[in-house]
Image (cartoon, rainbow, N blue to C red):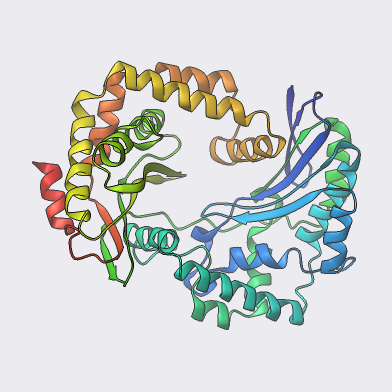
Amino acid sequence: MSIRVSTLPSGLTVVTEQMDRVETVSLGAYVGAGTRNETEAENGASHFLEHMAFKGTERRTATAIAEAVEDVGGHINAYTAREQTAYYVKLLKEDLALGADIIGDILTHSTFAPEELERERGVILQEIGQANDTPDDIVFDHFQETAYPDQPMGRPTLGREAGIKDMKRDVLTGYMRRHYTTGNTVVAAAGNLDHDRTLALITEHFADLPQSTPPKAVPGLYGGGEFREGRDLDQVHIVLGFPAMAYNDPDFYPSMLMSTLLGGGMSSRLFQEIRERRGLVYSIYSFTAPALDGGLFGIYAGTGEEEAKELVPVTLEELRRVQVDANEDELRRARAQTKAGLLMSLESTGSRCEQLARQIQVFGRIVPVAETVAKIEAVTLADIRRAASRIFRGRPTLAALGPTDHVPHLVDIADRLAA
């Protein structure tokens, strides 16, 4: 496998990874803008644009876009995150030119036809309604908003119903014009390809991408606090979190491994103690959500109304204990899980595209796999305990949805952690 990075005269960055043993290619455009780049009036615009990308260009109807890809057995999709919006395609290796044409076309020549815009507005409103009706989904939006109150980093990726209903075409086109630029986009391709040929295709099909400098995102300012909403549900859904490490923080890898040993699998502390030994939950796990200038650590659990009395104190005890008694067996297992996840992802052309683009956007360079593995291997028990102490001494954020009467309040949680 070989990785090459080129910057076109327009400022567009192109990165490819040649994988000769596969028969496919993946190609994506990764725009360095997402929910956190939206003004309050634009909330949901990144996600709305993701939907509209496949609804027609100057040369293709929505049907023609879908048929062009599926006629050759390919797959096209997109996603919106807080710091990135991605448009990608996976095809057989001989159809790379089609992929570059399609992705370039939707990024530079989408028409936003009024009838398509209204139709997709309805689809997004249905998506918001579905999320609101899914408590183990929407509780994460409440968690994010409570952690980052009154700022872009805390707003929902889907947008809010009222804002989507009122969003005008010129809001979408203006947002796209400001953020979908050559200096803010990485085009990545991985698979059975040739770098120079790929570069020529991207030069041709992305020629009309604007070259202006996008506005900077508003810094994320962690606040923390408590959200709870009583609903008539069989379970209460709880997310407990804390401010955590950005990508470039020295404790980033220790925090990842700490999360894995604490709540990252069936052998983790939370799973073993809370599900296996006590039977308090069906699902419990921890997660890290790093960003360019900060991050979150969180724990999700779904439990019964009465079980919540025991669940939260037991969870807090595990957070206290991991700061002092994480052991070598747990660290070894967490290292193995993290390394395996990284190395297995190298086998997917789509995952490689996403990783390569994100590394350039976060670090400004391609990070060799060996370097990442070395950093994982270098994490010690002292690092794990230090990262845990940093995280769990921060101001907590609590989001609870369902029968919440027996979920402790934030002040009680903070007191337990400080004891």
- Is the residue 146 above or below the residue 389 in the image? below
The answer to whether residue 311 is seen in the rendering is yes
Q: Quadrant of the N terminus?
A: top right
- Is the residue 150 above or below the residue 247 in the image? below
Q: Observer-nearest residue: 231 or 247?
A: 231
* Place of residue 31 in the rendered image (x, y in percent of width and height, measured from the top left): 64, 52
Q: Observer-nearest residue: 340 or 402?
A: 402
Give the residue at x 65% y 37%: 351
Give the residue at x 68% y 71%: 173
* Place of residue 230 in the rendered image (x, y in percent of width and height, measured from the top left): 28, 71
Task: Please indicate whether residue 419 sits to the left or right of residue 385 in the image.
Answer: left
* Place of residue 252 in the rendered image (x, y in percent of width and height, measured from the top left): 40, 32
Give the residue at x 17% y 61%: 406
Task: Please indicate whether residue 244 sits to the left or right of residue 9 in the image.
Answer: left
The answer to whether residue 213 is seen in the rendering is no
Q: Observer-nearest residue: 354 or 64?
A: 64
* Place of residue 356 in the rendered image (x, y in percent of width and height, measured from the top left): 64, 35
